Image (spheres, rainbow, N blue to C red):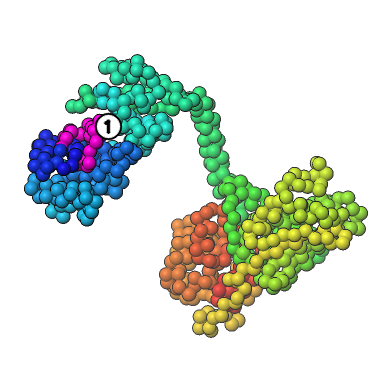
Amino acid sequence: MARLLVADNSPFYRKLLSDALEESGHRVRTVADGLEALQALESQDFDAAILDLVMPRLSGARACRQIKGSPATSDLPVIILSGLREDEIDDAEGIGADAFVAKMQAEAMMAHLTATLEELLTGRLEDTHRGFDRMHRREVVSELLEERRSRDAILSSLSEGYLRVSRDGMVLEANPAASRMLCRKEHEMVNRNLEEVLPCSSDEVALLLAHSDSPPTTRLQFGGAIIAVARSRQEGEESDSGLVLLLTDVTGEERAEAEKVDLQAQVQNAERLSALGEIVAGVAHELNNPLTGLLGYTELLLKLAPDERSRNRLKKLEHEALRCRRIVENLLCFARKRQAYRRPQSLNNVVSRSVQAVEMAAAKAGVDICTELAPDLPPALFDFGQMEQVLANLLANALQSLASVPPDRRLIFVRTGFQDGRLRLEVEDRGPGIAPALRERVFEPFYTTRRPEGGAGLGLAVTYGIVTEHGGRIIAEDAEPGARIVVELPASSRDQVAVQVSDGEVSGTSLSPTVLLVDDEPVVLDLLEDLLSDAGFQVTRTDNGAQALELVVQREFDAMLIDLKMPDMDGRQLYHEVCARRPAMASRIIFTTGDLDRPDLRMFLDETGAVLLRKPFELEQVADTFQAITRSGTATA
C-alpha cells in the first residue's frame, strides 16, 4: 500500500484516479493544481505523486520541477499525466518526471498508470512513456499549450523581474530576472509567501495585495540594491486570483540617466563619424583612379626623359603624387578600421615604397638610405599595410639614432634576402648602437633609449607584435658600429612552387600573349594598354562587365584584369560569370581596386585565392604579374 498524491484540475479525473487507486489498496490524497500539490508535500509524506501536465495557477510541469529541485522532495517519484502527444510536450526531459502516461480512455489509461506505478515503487521501471502510441492530436489543447509556450518565452526574455502572486500572497510563478534580482532559485520562491520572497514587511505586503484602482509602486532595499515593485492586477475571468508584480532595479537610476545622455552623444558622434567615413572612403576610392594614371604615366615618362632636368621635374611630380597616395591610404584607414589582410606579396615592394616615404625626411637630416634588394625573392604571406608600418618604425628609429653622429656616418642600409626557407629583412644604421644588456628590452612597450622628448617607446613594441603575429621573429644585433634590426618572415609555400601546365592548358603564350583589361576608368585602361603593349602583349580593353563577358565567350585570353568596383556588373559578378563559361580562366584572373579595406572584398579575395593589384600600382609590379601568369598559367603575387 502506497501513499499517493494526485493533482488534476478536472473533478472527473480526480474522482476516477482516486477510486481506481484506492481500489488497488493505495491511500490517495487529491488536489486541484500544482500549487496545492506543493503545499500538500510540505505537510504530509507521500510515496509518489501523479500530476496532470496542464493545470491553472501552477502546471504539473512547473510543480514537478519544484519537487525535483527541492532537496526535501527530490527523490519523490513523479508521474506526469499528459493529454498531449510526446512530441508536443515542451522540454519533456527538463521537466524531470520519472515517467509519463498518456491521458486516454479511462480503462486503458489506468492500466498504463497502474503498471508504471508498480514498477516505480518496486524500483524496476521498464518503460518511462506509456500509451502515447495510441493517442490522437488534440488541436485545442495543443493551441493552448503553444500559447503558454509563447508566454513563457516572453517572460524569460524580460529584463524586469516577474512574480505572479495569488490573492492570499502566495508566489505562483517567477521568471529568471526575478531569480537574479532576489538571489533565489525559482523553487525557493514558488509556493512561498510574498513576505518570505521580498525584503518587505507585512504592512508593505498588505499594501501590494490591497485592492486599489491605482496600482502602487513600492521601493524596497535589498542587498544594497533598490528595487521598484509595481503591481498589476490580473484581468479577465480569474481577476480575483491574484496579481502580477514587476520588479525593476533602480539602484543606478541617476547614473543610468547620465549614461543615457552620454550614450546618446556617443551614438550621434558615431553616426556623424560613420557618415563622414563613408564620404571619405568614397572620395579616397575615386582619387585612386586618377592617381593610378598620374603615377603610372609619370613612371613611363621618367624612362623616356631626354635630359636630367626633365627627369628631376618628373621626379618632383612623382614625389608629390606619392604623397597624395599616402594621404589617400590614410583616409581609407580613417574611414574603415582596417583588419589584417594577408596575401602572398613581394617584400621588396614594401621596402621600395617605405623608403620612398622617408626619402625627404632623410635628405633633410643628411642621411643616405642604401637599399640592397635580393632579386627573385619569393613572396611572403603578410598584410601590406602592417608591413609598411614595420618598415616605417624601423626607419624612423634608424633616422633618430643618426642625429648625434658625424655626417660621414649618417647611413642606413636596408637589405632583403632569403635564407633557410625564410625571408630576411635588415635595417642597419651607423649610429651609436644598442648596448648588449638593452637589446632584449628595446621591444618592450614604453621602453625607449631616446631623450625624454624623443619618443613614447611604442614603435618597436608595435613592430614586434606585427612580426610575431605574422609567424616571424625580430632581433636586435650589433653592426659595429651601429645597430641592426633583423626581421625574418616565413615564405609563402603556395607560391614558391611553380605551377606546371601543359601546352594545351594555356594558349597563345609563345610570342604575343593576349590579355583582356576590364576597368570603368579610361585613364587606367590607357595606362595599362600602353604599358602592356610596350611589353609585347596583345591588349583588348573594355569599360564594362557585360562586354567583357561577350569577349570571353568569343575567344580565349591568356590573362584577364578586372576592376572590382564597376557599375552594373561589378568585378565579383564578372568573375563568377567568366568562371562558369571558361573554368580554366579562374587561375588567370587578376583583380585591381583602390578600396581593399572592405571586409566583403577581403573575404572574396581569400575565397578565390586571386592576385590583387592595389591602385595606385607600380608599373614594374603590373608587368611582372602579367609575365608570370602568361608564362605559368597561374597568377602569382
In this view, 354 is above or below 77? below
Residue span colored magenta: 28-54
Residue 53: say if magenta: yes
Judge from the rendering whether residue 489 lies leftward or rightward of residue 71; answer left or right: right
Give the side of residue 551 with respect to residue 509, left or right: left
Give how far across and how far down residue 264 sits, in percent. Answer: 51, 31
Q: Amino acid at mark 1?
A: Glu
In percent of width and height, residue 228 lies at 41, 23
As drawn, which residue projects farthest toward the bottom?
Answer: 503
**Quadrant in which the N terminus is drawn:** top left
| Left or right of 413 on screen, residue 207 | left
Residue 575 is situated, as x and y percent measured from the top left of the image, at: 47, 65
154 versus 286 height, above or below: above
Does residue 139 appear to the left or right of 163 in the view shown?
left
Q: Which residue is mark 1?
A: 42
Let me know if residue 305 appears in the view: no
Label 1 element class: helix
**Residue 278: x, y in percent?**
54, 45
* Residue positioned 38% across, 25% down in the render: 198
Quadrant in the picture for residue 169: top left
Q: Quadrant of the C terminus?
A: bottom right
